[in-house]
């Protein structure tokens, strides 16, 4: 509750700290999610629901089926943008 009265910068730092606590250490590896563009929402739901609790905390590496790419952030950003468009 005390976070509500803080400045935006303080809230931002607080939020980053919470996210860091919830994320698994880098050494624990990452999870590779291979999704089809034409079935993105259903594939995403099915794949994420199949992850274990520990795997949910690992870093996700998104890959679109049949599209060679290295996920350096662009593929992940595109994934979240497409999912957001479907949902909203």
Image (tube, rainbow, N blue to C red):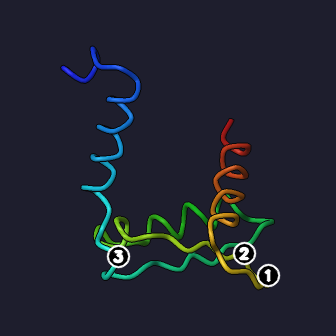
**Numbered tag placed on residue 64 in the rendering:** 2
Q: Position of residue 55 (x, y in %)?
A: 36, 73
Q: Nearer the viewer, mark 3 or mark 2?
A: 3
Q: Which quadrant of the rendered structure holds the N terminus?
A: top left
Q: Position of residue 64 (x, y in %)?
A: 72, 75
Residue occupied by mark 1:
67
- Which one is in front, 43 or 32? 32
Q: Identify the residue shown where x is 50% and y is 70%.
A: 60
Measured Cα–Cα span from mark 3 to mark 2 = 23 Å
Could you say whether the residue bearing mark 1 is in a helix, strand or loop? Answer: loop
Labels 1 and 3: the sequence-earlier one: 3
Total number of numbered discs in the rendering: 3
- Looking at the rendering, which quadrant does residue 35 occupy? bottom right
Is 65 displayed left or right of 27 in the figure?
right
Residue occupied by mark 3:
26
Could you say whether the residue bearing mark 2 is in a helix, strand or loop? Answer: strand
Q: Specify few, some or many for label 2: CA neighbours under 10 Å numbering under 14, 14-19, or 20 or more.
A: some
- Which one is in front, 8 or 59? 8
Q: Identify the residue shown where x is 66% and y is 76%.
A: 63
Against 49, residue 82 (above or below) is: above
Q: Position of residue 71 (x, y in %)?
A: 64, 74
Q: Identify the residue shown where x is 73% and y is 80%.
A: 69
Q: Nearer the viewer, mark 1 or mark 3?
A: 3
């Amino acid at each position: 509750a005390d976070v509500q009265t803080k400045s935006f910068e303080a809230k931002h730092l607080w939020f980053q700290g919470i996210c860091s606590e919830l994320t698994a250490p880098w050494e624990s590896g990452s999870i590779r999610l291979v999704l089809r563009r034409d079935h993105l929402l259903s594939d995403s739901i099915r794949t994420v629901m199949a992850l274990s609790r520990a795997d949910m905390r690992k870093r996700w590496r998104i890959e679109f089926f049949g599209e060679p790419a290295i996920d350096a952030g662009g593929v992940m950003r595109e994934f979240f943008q497409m999912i957001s468009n479907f949902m909203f």
